[in-house]
Image (cartoon, rainbow, N blue to C red):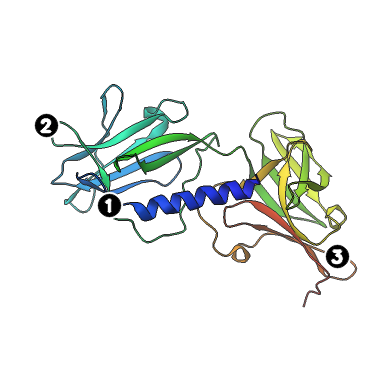
Amino acid sequence: MKFTQRLGDGARAVNRATRSLGRDLVGGPEAVYARVLDGEHLWVAVDAATGRPALRDPASGEIVEATALPGEDPAYASARWRLDDVLPPAEDAELQLVALTGDGAKPTRLRPAPPHPEGNLRVPPTPDGRWRFLVEPDARGLLRVRRSSAAHVARLTHISVDGDAVRVVVSPPVAGLEPRLHFVAKDDLVAHSVPAETAGGEIVAHVRVTDLPATAGGYRVAVGPLTEPVTVVRLRNDIHITEPANVLLPHLLDPETEAIAGRFLYTTQGVLRLMRKDAETVS
């Protein structure tokens, strides 16, 4: 299955889950806010009358509290956790979101509030690119935060015009990845490859007009071995890009005709692509 199709399928599944929130849920207090915004920290807020937010290990029942966050509105109680400090480093490790009342009562599981209007924010991976933390309802419709392996991708750290070339600098997911940059066609076959070099643990390629695929069309940018190219994505892939043309990335001009020969852009999922152009005169 194509990489971009897997990303799209995942996004559609998240959207379906989001639209289902607030319907047919088990009774309980709402988390008025529960989200991971930066890939590292979980923010939770509840109505102050409900108690204060906490996390609970579903197996042991151990409670993980956090220092309360000061807020402008006393009607809410808020807390924040650095999830790498509280979630075991294992696939599908999870903690339940609960409310504590402070009177010795049993912690109460939190349920999602009605969904907010869909925005363009997405949960980025952890800074090391290994994990993604997901806040989602379980089978009973009650909130949990779960650790999941992030997609095996390379991250774009720099792209700029460098003379007659575009300089592309990529952080690979593992050390020692073969230093080559590829343009992958829609059939997942490599249409053309560009030699690169390794500098400071990153893969650096200079792409010139003569390095572009011969056939016009869209190509996914990847690095590594020819047999298993690794897709390149935005460094902090934390938004859905609704209009790729609005993100200005470098393009290459044919030096003789001043026509746009190739343009780099992001997909809505943050994947780096090259659009190989037919002859297009620059006005």
Secondary structure found at label 1? loop
Single out the residue that lies furthest toward the bottom. Answer: 283
Q: Residue 57, how many percent across, how many down?
A: 30, 27
Q: Are marks 3 and 1 in contact (CB under 8 Å)?
A: no
- In the picture, the disc for residue 254 is 3
Decide if residue 238 is in sight here. Answer: no
The residue at 55%/59% (across/down) is 241
Write the residue at 29% across / 41% down: 142
Corner quadrant of residue 244: bottom right
Mark 1 is on which residue type? Ala
Quarter in which the N terminus is drawn:
top right
| Residue type of the residue flagged with mark 3 | Asp
The residue at which mark 2 appears reads as 105
Nearer the observer, 158 or 25 = 25
For label 2, the crowd category at 10 Å Cα-Cα, with few meaning under 14, some 14 to 19 and many 20 or more, is few
What number is the disc on residue 103? Answer: none
Q: Earlier in the sequence, mark 2 or mark 1?
A: 2
The quarter of the picture where residue 160 lies is bottom right
Q: Nearer the viewer, mark 3 or mark 1?
A: 1
